[in-house]
Image (tube, helix red, strand yellow):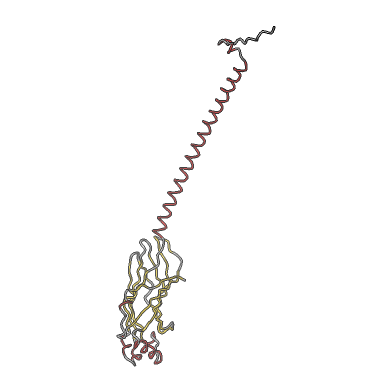
Amino acid sequence: MNTPHQQIPIQFTPDDRLNRPHVNEGRQLRRHHTARYYVHRVKESLTTRVSKLICSVFLSLLFIVGLITFILWLSLRPHRPRYHIHEFSIPSIAQDNGFATAQATFNVTARNANLNIGIYYDTMHLTLYYQDQNIGEMPLLFPFYQSPKNTTVLYGTFSGSTLVVDTARWTQFVADRMRGMVSFRLEVVTSMRFKVATWESKNHKMHANCLIGVGPDGLLITSYKEKKCRVYFT
């Protein structure tokens, strides 16, 4: 007769647990792995912190240098001179046959709006145009230096040999006058250099084109007074 098998539970004492080699080896391996892992993490953390510190210092220095460069560029960047037409008149235009005594008087201002940059004007030449035809030209002023934040008044008169107007041209003036306005263009051409402290730039050729409208009385029309001239370099 078969008797049922009985299972007797086996309990280990603390001494028995110490004598189990596979358990002890597993624990020793886990402790050894954990130590290496933390050493590696510490080294990695230190390397990361040092790298971040170096990157932060480098980026900060780069930002400061860029900011200083930008500020210097803003303060030392040359701005074009500003030209405005204030007065222009041809009094004899009111007369049908006034070309024999024709004179054209002008008043233009040149403004150096730069804060720390001066301008050397080596030459200055003015040309008067009617329908894009040259009817007068003259040199103006001797070489001069214009300090920062300064305005220079340019004035003069085209007459005689500097103003070439014949009967046919005067007839065109009169026809435009009858329509209410005679249009001219005054061009200022200069050879100039910018000056910053002791540094001077190369020569630049600058053009300032001033549009002019003269009424039947020979005077500058109000809408053209204080009008800004177009300035460009070539």
218 or 112, nearer to the observer: 218
Q: Residue furthest top?
A: 1
Residue 61, percent from left and from top = 45, 46
Residue at 63%, 9% in the rendered image: 6
- The answer to which quarter of the image holds residue 121 is bottom left
Query: Residue lying furthest right in this view?
Result: 1
* Left or right of 188, for residue 37: right
Query: Is the N terminus in the top left, top right, bottom left or bottom right quadrant?
Result: top right
Q: Quadrant of residue 37?
A: top right
Front-most of 178 and 74? 178
Farthest residue toward the front? 1
Q: Position of residue 70 (x, y in %)?
A: 42, 55
- Residue depicted at 60% across the width and 20% down the height: 26
**Residue sitting nearer the eye, 75 or 9:** 9
Image-quadrant location for residue 218? bottom left
Residue 196 versus residue 223 in the image, above or below: above
Picture coordinates of residue 47, whole percent (x, y): 52, 35
Position of 9 relative to 143 (above/below): above
Residue at 53 percent across and 31 percent down: it is 41
Q: Nearer the viewer, residue 205 or 86?
A: 86
Residue 183 pos. (x, y %):
37, 82
